[in-house]
Amino acid sequence: MLCALVMTGSLFAVPAFAQADLANATAKLTLQVATAMLGERCRRVEAPNPASFASVSLHRTFHDDFDTHPLQGDRWVPHYAGGAAWPEARYWGGDGSDFKRKTSWNGEQQIYVDPRYGGRETAPLGLDPFSVNDGILSITASRTPPALKSVLFNNEYISGVLTTQSRFSQKYGYFEIRAKVPVGTAVWPAFWMLADDGGWPPEVDIMEGRGQRPGDIVMTTHWRIPSTQRIESCGFDVKVADAATVFHNYGVLWQPDRITYFIDRQPVSEIKVPVGFDDPMYMIVNLAMGSKFFEGVGFVDGETPATVAFEIDSISAYQIDER
């Protein structure tokens, strides 16, 4: 989810933060990755000769299948937490600001809320964009109640974000979401990762939906060239025709030499690991509304659904097994 966060190693490192309550901690996974040499740009993984692939064995390090409300445990934070690279002055608004609850640089038109958030007020507003039903988490975006619009900084929508920053991060491994991807004008769901040190980039966009283009899934890597400070990006749109109505797995395998994107655990694209991917990364899942840069999303208008839900079955992380 391309965002300038001025607000838009060890070969098999252990997670920077351990998860206290890890279900099925011994769960194993094997993925197939290409072995061909990589160039400097990303490329699609075409239907290959099986002999050109190798197996990567992994073990689970994080898992949430959303049997309970996501804020009941210690896995998730319902806002951006900031980091060492963010100027202290950006926090002058404190918890009563919207800085940690939207990416203004992107032109987003929602504010991320949770039951304890009060906006411009000191008392919690009790707004909850998260609900769980039969093991499915819904992050719901809805039009801001008129009586609360000024309290919520005049944003058109309220919605939700969940991040594992300060709760779980990991260098290398496989990160995956199983979800339906909602559609509609201004609808922008995403599952992505940022560096735990708070800097930007690097950024890994595991899955983004272009709300005005049903079935269009975007998977992108972003990095910075140190000598010029120029931001580079490389990725692809992948067609998943029934993405809005059927649960699919969207994942990324980060190895020391390459980053491979997967849909339903089949590789679809890959890139040589760019410069700057040195620190553990944490996961973010959110439903934004409106974008001035991300093509195929658009801005809120009369066609935008009054309520739209991002349905998530599970989110998991795996670490690469040592050989």
Image (tube, rainbow, N blue to C red):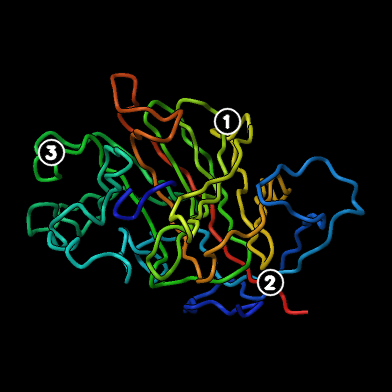
Q: How many marks?
A: 3
Question: Label 2 sits on what residue type?
Answer: Ile
In the rendered view, would you say 294 is above or below 177?
A: above
Is 258 left, or right, of 7 in this rendering?
right
Q: Earlier in the sequence, mark 1 or mark 3?
A: 3
Q: Residues within 10 Å of mark 1 (few under 14, many from 20)?
A: many
Tell me the distance, in whole angstroms, between the alpha carbons under discs 1 and 2.
30 Å
Residue type (three-letter) at the residue carrying disc 1: Gly
Q: Nearer the viewer, mark 2 or mark 3?
A: 2
Can you identify the residue that label 1 sits on? 215
Q: Residues within 10 Å of mark 3 (few under 14, many from 20)?
A: some
Which of the image's four quarters has the C terminus? bottom right
Mark 2: secondary structure: strand
Q: Would residue 104 be found to the left or right of residue 224 on screen?
A: left
Residue placed at 24% from the left, 65% from the top?
A: 87
Instruction: Name which of mark 2 and mark 3 comes first in the sequence.
Output: 3
Q: Secondary structure at mark 1?
A: loop
Residue type at the position of mark 3 = Lys
In the rendered structure, which disc, 1 or 2, sits on the residue that comes first in sequence? Answer: 1
Query: What is the spatial separation of the Cα atoms under label 1 and label 3, in whole angstroms?
Result: 32 Å
The reply to whether the C-beta atoms of the residues labelled 1 and 3 are less than 8 Å apart is no
Q: Where is residue 82? Give x, y as percent.
A: 30, 64
**Residue 266, x across and y down, in percent:** 73, 48
**Viewer-nearest residue: 224 or 215:** 224
**Marks 2/3: CA–CA distance:** 46 Å
Q: What kind of element bears circle 3? A: loop
Q: Are marks 1 and 2 in contact (CB under 8 Å)?
A: no
Residue identified by numbered label 3:
149
Q: In the rendered view, tell whether residue 157 sits above or below residue 201.
A: above
Q: Residues within 10 Å of mark 2 (few under 14, many from 20)?
A: many
| Mark 2, residue position | 320
Please give the name of the residue rendered at 65% of the width and 50% of the height, measured from the top-left corner. Answer: 261
